[in-house]
Image (cartoon, coloured by chain):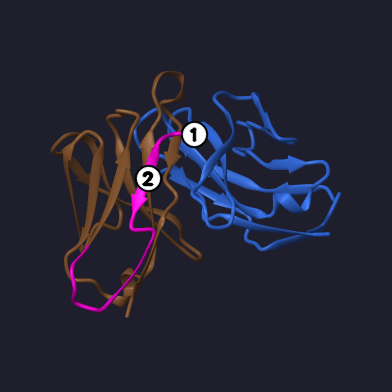
Amino acid sequence: GDSVTQMEGPVTLSEEAFLTINCTYTATGYPSLFWYVQYPGEGLQLLLKATKADDKGSNKGFEATYRKETTSFHLEKGSVQVSDSAVYFCALNTGGFKTIFGAGTRLFVKA
Amino acid sequence: DAGITQSPRHKVTETGTPVTLRCHQTENHRYMYWYRQDPGHGLRLIHYSYGVKDTDKGEVSDGYSVSRSKTEDFLLTLESATSSQTSVYFCAIRGAGTNQETQYFGPGTRLLVL
Protein backbone atom coordinates (compact mmCIF):
# COMPACT_ATOMS: atom_id res chain seq x y z
CA GLY A 1 0.00 0.00 0.00
CA ASP A 2 0.88 3.66 -0.14
CA SER A 3 3.30 4.87 2.50
CA VAL A 4 5.49 7.78 3.54
CA THR A 5 8.83 7.51 5.31
CA GLN A 6 10.52 10.52 6.86
CA MET A 7 13.64 10.94 8.89
CA GLU A 8 13.38 10.36 12.58
CA GLY A 9 13.86 13.24 14.92
CA PRO A 10 14.36 15.18 16.86
CA VAL A 11 16.45 17.47 14.74
CA THR A 12 18.23 20.17 16.73
CA LEU A 13 19.72 23.18 14.94
CA SER A 14 21.07 26.57 15.83
CA GLU A 15 19.34 29.66 14.53
CA GLU A 16 20.29 30.50 10.92
CA ALA A 17 21.39 26.92 10.17
CA PHE A 18 20.32 25.08 7.02
CA LEU A 19 17.51 22.57 7.40
CA THR A 20 16.81 19.40 5.48
CA ILE A 21 14.16 16.88 6.49
CA ASN A 22 14.11 13.84 4.25
CA CYS A 23 10.91 12.27 2.97
CA THR A 24 10.42 9.36 0.58
CA TYR A 25 7.20 7.77 -0.53
CA THR A 26 5.72 4.66 -2.07
CA ALA A 27 2.54 5.02 -4.07
CA THR A 28 0.61 3.47 -6.90
CA GLY A 29 -0.44 6.12 -9.35
CA TYR A 30 0.66 9.74 -9.26
CA PRO A 31 0.28 11.27 -5.83
CA SER A 32 0.24 14.86 -4.72
CA LEU A 33 2.78 15.50 -1.99
CA PHE A 34 2.49 17.72 1.06
CA TRP A 35 4.33 19.06 4.04
CA TYR A 36 2.23 19.91 7.08
CA VAL A 37 3.52 21.68 10.19
CA GLN A 38 2.28 21.35 13.75
CA TYR A 39 3.20 24.08 16.22
CA PRO A 40 3.04 23.25 19.94
CA GLY A 41 -0.50 22.77 21.18
CA GLU A 42 -2.06 23.17 17.74
CA GLY A 43 -3.42 21.05 14.92
CA LEU A 44 -1.60 20.40 11.68
CA GLN A 45 -1.65 23.04 8.99
CA LEU A 46 -0.56 22.89 5.38
CA LEU A 47 2.94 24.28 4.81
CA LEU A 48 3.40 23.54 1.11
CA LYS A 49 2.42 21.10 -1.60
CA ALA A 50 3.37 19.87 -5.07
CA THR A 51 1.00 18.10 -7.39
CA LYS A 52 3.23 16.70 -10.13
CA ALA A 53 6.79 15.65 -10.83
CA ASP A 54 9.42 18.43 -10.79
CA ASP A 55 7.02 20.89 -9.15
CA LYS A 56 8.48 22.92 -6.31
CA GLY A 57 6.27 23.88 -3.41
CA SER A 58 7.32 26.84 -1.28
CA ASN A 59 6.04 28.84 1.66
CA LYS A 60 7.55 30.88 4.53
CA GLY A 61 11.08 30.22 3.22
CA PHE A 62 10.58 26.45 3.09
CA GLU A 63 10.87 24.56 -0.18
CA ALA A 64 10.40 21.00 -1.39
CA THR A 65 10.74 19.57 -4.90
CA TYR A 66 8.72 16.58 -6.13
CA ARG A 67 11.32 14.09 -7.40
CA LYS A 68 9.62 11.20 -9.14
CA GLU A 69 12.85 9.44 -10.08
CA THR A 70 13.90 9.16 -6.43
CA THR A 71 10.34 9.14 -5.00
CA SER A 72 11.31 11.93 -2.64
CA PHE A 73 10.01 15.26 -1.36
CA HIS A 74 12.67 16.62 0.98
CA LEU A 75 11.90 19.77 2.96
CA GLU A 76 14.57 22.50 3.03
CA LYS A 77 15.03 25.95 4.51
CA GLY A 78 18.13 28.04 4.14
CA SER A 79 18.09 29.75 7.54
CA VAL A 80 15.88 28.49 10.34
CA GLN A 81 14.49 30.62 13.13
CA VAL A 82 13.45 29.74 16.67
CA SER A 83 9.86 30.20 15.56
CA ASP A 84 10.27 27.26 13.14
CA SER A 85 10.42 24.85 16.06
CA ALA A 86 7.57 22.44 15.39
CA VAL A 87 6.74 18.95 14.16
CA TYR A 88 6.82 18.50 10.38
CA PHE A 89 4.78 15.83 8.59
CA CYS A 90 5.29 14.64 5.04
CA ALA A 91 2.12 13.31 3.39
CA LEU A 92 0.70 12.06 0.13
CA ASN A 93 -2.69 11.90 -1.52
CA THR A 94 -3.42 9.92 -4.67
CA GLY A 95 -6.48 11.94 -5.58
CA GLY A 96 -8.87 10.22 -3.25
CA PHE A 97 -10.30 11.16 0.08
CA LYS A 98 -7.50 9.66 2.18
CA THR A 99 -4.18 11.24 3.01
CA ILE A 100 -1.24 9.14 4.16
CA PHE A 101 0.99 10.83 6.74
CA GLY A 102 4.55 10.13 7.77
CA ALA A 103 5.44 9.72 11.43
CA GLY A 104 6.52 13.33 11.82
CA THR A 105 9.90 14.94 12.53
CA ARG A 106 10.32 17.24 15.50
CA LEU A 107 12.56 20.26 14.93
CA PHE A 108 14.14 22.25 17.75
CA VAL A 109 15.87 25.51 16.86
CA LYS A 110 18.15 27.05 19.50
CA ALA A 111 18.79 30.77 19.75
CA ASP B 1 -8.44 29.47 8.75
CA ALA B 2 -10.93 26.66 8.31
CA GLY B 3 -13.70 26.89 10.90
CA ILE B 4 -13.12 23.67 12.82
CA THR B 5 -13.60 23.39 16.56
CA GLN B 6 -13.24 20.45 18.87
CA SER B 7 -14.69 19.89 22.31
CA PRO B 8 -13.61 19.27 24.92
CA ARG B 9 -10.01 20.36 24.44
CA HIS B 10 -8.83 18.34 27.43
CA LYS B 11 -10.41 15.43 29.23
CA VAL B 12 -9.42 13.04 32.00
CA THR B 13 -11.54 9.94 32.41
CA GLU B 14 -11.40 6.52 34.01
CA THR B 15 -11.03 3.14 32.39
CA GLY B 16 -14.34 1.64 31.37
CA THR B 17 -16.27 4.86 31.00
CA PRO B 18 -17.73 6.03 27.68
CA VAL B 19 -16.34 9.24 26.22
CA THR B 20 -17.64 11.37 23.34
CA LEU B 21 -15.56 13.92 21.49
CA ARG B 22 -17.18 16.48 19.23
CA CYS B 23 -15.98 18.08 16.03
CA HIS B 24 -17.84 21.02 14.54
CA GLN B 25 -17.16 22.66 11.16
CA THR B 26 -18.59 25.80 9.64
CA GLU B 27 -17.36 25.06 6.11
CA ASN B 28 -20.20 22.75 5.01
CA HIS B 29 -17.65 20.25 3.71
CA ARG B 30 -18.69 16.71 2.97
CA TYR B 31 -15.70 14.73 4.24
CA MET B 32 -14.68 14.68 7.90
CA TYR B 33 -12.05 12.60 9.65
CA TRP B 34 -10.95 11.53 13.10
CA TYR B 35 -7.25 10.81 13.73
CA ARG B 36 -5.23 9.96 16.77
CA GLN B 37 -1.66 11.14 17.24
CA ASP B 38 0.81 9.13 19.27
CA PRO B 39 4.59 9.38 19.57
CA GLY B 40 6.32 7.26 16.94
CA HIS B 41 3.10 6.64 15.03
CA GLY B 42 2.32 9.99 13.55
CA LEU B 43 -1.33 10.34 12.60
CA ARG B 44 -3.54 7.29 12.30
CA LEU B 45 -7.03 7.39 10.83
CA ILE B 46 -9.77 6.13 13.14
CA HIS B 47 -12.96 6.77 11.17
CA TYR B 48 -14.11 9.08 8.44
CA SER B 49 -17.41 10.34 7.07
CA TYR B 50 -18.39 11.18 3.51
CA GLY B 51 -21.81 12.60 4.30
CA VAL B 52 -24.62 12.66 6.81
CA LYS B 53 -25.02 9.15 8.21
CA ASP B 54 -22.26 7.87 5.88
CA THR B 55 -19.19 6.70 7.76
CA ASP B 56 -16.44 4.14 7.35
CA LYS B 57 -13.58 2.66 9.33
CA GLY B 58 -9.97 3.71 9.21
CA GLU B 59 -6.89 1.75 10.21
CA VAL B 60 -7.39 1.88 14.00
CA SER B 61 -11.15 1.77 14.47
CA ASP B 62 -11.43 -0.93 17.16
CA GLY B 63 -13.00 0.46 20.33
CA TYR B 64 -14.32 3.57 18.58
CA SER B 65 -17.61 4.48 16.97
CA VAL B 66 -18.73 7.62 15.15
CA SER B 67 -21.91 9.37 14.20
CA ARG B 68 -22.79 12.18 11.84
CA SER B 69 -26.38 13.37 12.04
CA LYS B 70 -25.64 16.83 10.63
CA THR B 71 -23.14 18.03 8.05
CA GLU B 72 -21.40 20.23 10.58
CA ASP B 73 -20.95 17.75 13.42
CA PHE B 74 -18.91 14.55 13.62
CA LEU B 75 -18.85 12.71 16.94
CA LEU B 76 -16.26 10.17 18.08
CA THR B 77 -17.24 7.82 20.91
CA LEU B 78 -14.94 5.61 22.92
CA GLU B 79 -17.41 2.96 23.99
CA SER B 80 -15.43 1.85 27.04
CA ALA B 81 -12.24 3.83 27.42
CA THR B 82 -8.94 2.00 27.96
CA SER B 83 -5.51 3.34 28.86
CA SER B 84 -4.31 2.55 25.33
CA GLN B 85 -6.72 5.19 24.08
CA THR B 86 -4.84 7.92 25.90
CA SER B 87 -3.86 10.13 22.98
CA VAL B 88 -4.37 13.41 21.21
CA TYR B 89 -7.37 13.28 18.87
CA PHE B 90 -7.66 15.48 15.81
CA CYS B 91 -10.61 16.14 13.60
CA ALA B 92 -10.06 17.20 10.01
CA ILE B 93 -12.07 18.15 6.95
CA ARG B 94 -11.24 17.68 3.32
CA GLY B 95 -10.77 20.84 1.33
CA ALA B 96 -12.85 21.74 -1.71
CA GLY B 97 -12.18 22.58 -5.33
CA THR B 98 -8.48 22.93 -6.09
CA ASN B 99 -7.79 22.21 -2.41
CA GLN B 100 -9.67 18.92 -2.23
CA GLU B 101 -6.48 16.96 -1.58
CA THR B 102 -5.65 19.18 1.40
CA GLN B 103 -6.85 18.41 4.90
CA TYR B 104 -7.69 21.11 7.44
CA PHE B 105 -7.35 20.26 11.10
CA GLY B 106 -8.99 21.24 14.32
CA PRO B 107 -6.95 22.17 17.42
CA GLY B 108 -7.10 18.68 18.95
CA THR B 109 -8.44 17.05 22.10
CA ARG B 110 -5.99 15.70 24.65
CA LEU B 111 -7.49 12.63 26.35
CA LEU B 112 -6.05 10.89 29.39
CA VAL B 113 -7.56 7.57 30.45
CA LEU B 114 -6.60 6.57 33.99
Circle 1 sits in a helix, a strand or a loop, which is it? loop
Residue with the mark numbered 1: B1
* Amino acid type shown at disc 1: Asp
From the viewer's perspective, tell me whether residue A18 is left or right of residue B74: right
The residue carrying pointer 2 sits among few (fewer than 14), some (14 to 19) or many (20 or more) residues within 10 Å by Cα, namely: many
Figure quadrant of residue B21: bottom left
Spot occupied by residue B28 in the image (x, y as percentages of width and height): 29, 28
Circle 2 sits in a helix, a strand or a loop, which is it? strand
The residue carrying pointer 1 sits among few (fewer than 14), some (14 to 19) or many (20 or more) residues within 10 Å by Cα, namely: few
Q: Is residue B14 found inside the magenta-colored segment of the image?
A: yes
Q: Residue furthest right?
A: A16
Residue with the mark numbered 2: B5
Mark 1, chain letter? B
Q: Colour of chain B?
A: brown
Magenta extent: B1-19
Figure quadrant of residue A100: top left
CB-based contact (under 8 Å), mark 1 and mark 2: no
Figure quadrant of residue B48: top left
Image point 86% across, 49% down: which residue? A16
Spot occupied by residue A105 in the image (x, y as percentages of width and height): 61, 56
Q: Is residue A25 found inside the magenta-colored segment of the image?
A: no
Image point 29% across, 58% down: which residue? B60
Q: Colour of chain A?
A: blue
Q: Are marks 1 and 2 on the same chain?
A: yes
Q: Residue furthest top?
A: B97
